[in-house]
Structure formats: structure tokens, C-alpha cells
Amino acid sequence: MVDLLSLQKYFILRHLGEGCRACDFTMGNGHDTAFLSQTVGKTGSVTAFDIQPKALESTAKNLREWGCPENWHLICQSHHLAPQYVKEPIKAGMFNLGYMPGSGNKALTTMRETTLPAVENALSLLDKDSILMVAVYPGHPEGRLEGEELQKYFSTLSRYKLCIAKFEMLNSPDSPYFMIAETK
């Protein structure tokens, strides 16, 4: 059976390595932040965003417990404000839309109003030979609408500048899926 998480990492590792810069645009509990931190190593850097102070606390604790290099910067701001904090091109960016796992608050989710500008901004931060990965969770109303809006937006972008793909389980319409945008 296809493991979407392994597939996401496969694509990111084709672009990201030691010494690179990366962003986790939806930090949550820090699983993607940790993956990025370990991948870029001591000489790289990772900037991670979340609007919930609880996410920063949980992520910082987890990164230390998981032995990640101290190459990370956690920012308590919306992901659409990333260009105010990230001034150099990145090789990889990750979005895991939806709500923070284990938070107990499924009503607090990413929202279309900030997600689309955040994705647009993230694309503008990508370096040459870079990737942006966006995981969508259509099992709740806002997640479904976010996914539809992002697909519509991605379909308007030039295929001469970006390669954009979608990976989903066709026989499970409420299952998470992801889209990638790779720079040429």
C-alpha cells in the first residue's frame, strides 16, 4: 500500500540536503520541522511558523528530545507572513493543513484566507531546483475548500516555471492528499 508520508519525504529529499534552508509553514507538533532540521543538519537552517503558542512549546520540546540540531527558528505568526522573516531562498517548504494533532481543538484550522497567500508567498521564496509540499485534509469542510482553492490556483501557474503534481487515493475521497510544486 502507498504510504503518502514516505512519498512526501522521497520528493523533498530529491531537493534538500546538508546546509540548505527550509521552512515548515504549519509547525503543529514539529514532526515536519524535525524532518527538515535533521535533513539540513548543523550547517542548514529551518524556519517554522504556527499561530498557536502551544505549537511552539510542543515543537521546541520535541526537537530537543528528538536530538535535532539547533538550526531551527520557531515563529509564532501566520504562515502568510513568512516573507517578513525569511529573507533568503529556500530549497524546501512544507504545509500540513488542517488542525494541530493532539490539540483537542479541531475548530482551529488553517483557513483559505491565509493559506492561499501563504502558498503564493512560499512559491516566491523557492530557490532553483526546490520543492513546496502541501498536504491537504479534505475530511472537514474547510480542508475540502482549501484543497479546491489550491488546486484551482496551482492549475493557473506556468508549466515552464513549475512542475506541479497531486497525489491522492482515488478510492478514498476523504483521505489526505498532497500536492507538490517543483521549480525548474
Image: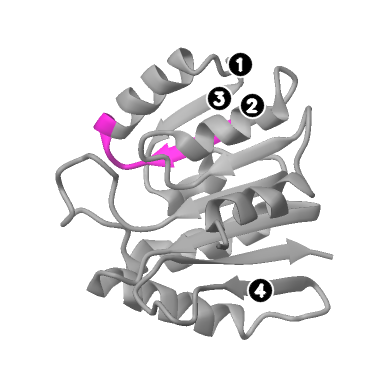
Residue 161 included in the magenta stretch of the image: no
Say which label, 1 or 4, has the lower sequence index.
Answer: 1
Q: Position of residue 24 (x, y in %)?
A: 52, 42
Please state which of residues 40 and 90 is positioned toward the viewer in this rendering: 40
- Residues marked 3 and 2 touching at CB (< 8 Å): no
Please state which of residues 117 and 70 is positioned toward the viewer in this rendering: 70
Nearest to the eye among marks 3 and 1: give it: 1
The quarter of the picture where residue 53 lies is top left
Residue at the extreme front: 1
- Residues marked 2 and 1 touching at CB (< 8 Å): yes
The amino acid at mark 4 is Ala
Measured Cα–Cα span from mark 1 to mark 4: 31 Å
The secondary element bearing badge 4 is classed as strand
Query: Which quadrant of the rendered structure holds the N terminus?
Result: bottom right
Q: Is residue 99 above or below residue 28?
A: below
Measured Cα–Cα span from mark 3 to mark 1: 8 Å
- At 78% from the left and 63% from the top, the residue drawn is 183
The secondary element bearing badge 2 is classed as helix
The circle drawn on residue 69 is: 1
Measured Cα–Cα span from mark 3 to mark 2: 10 Å
Residue 47 included in the magenta stretch of the image: yes
The secondary element bearing badge 1 is classed as loop
The quarter of the picture where residue 88 lies is top right
Say which label, 3 or 4, has the lower sequence index.
Answer: 3
- Residues marked 1 and 4 touching at CB (< 8 Å): no
Query: Which quadrant of the rendered structure holds the C terminus?
Result: bottom right
Instruction: Identify the magenta region.
Output: 46-54
Measured Cα–Cα span from mark 3 to mark 4: 28 Å
User: Which residue, given by chain and number where applicable, does mark 4 sit on?
Assistant: 165
The amino acid at mark 1 is Pro
Q: Position of residue 84 (x, y in %)?
A: 52, 43
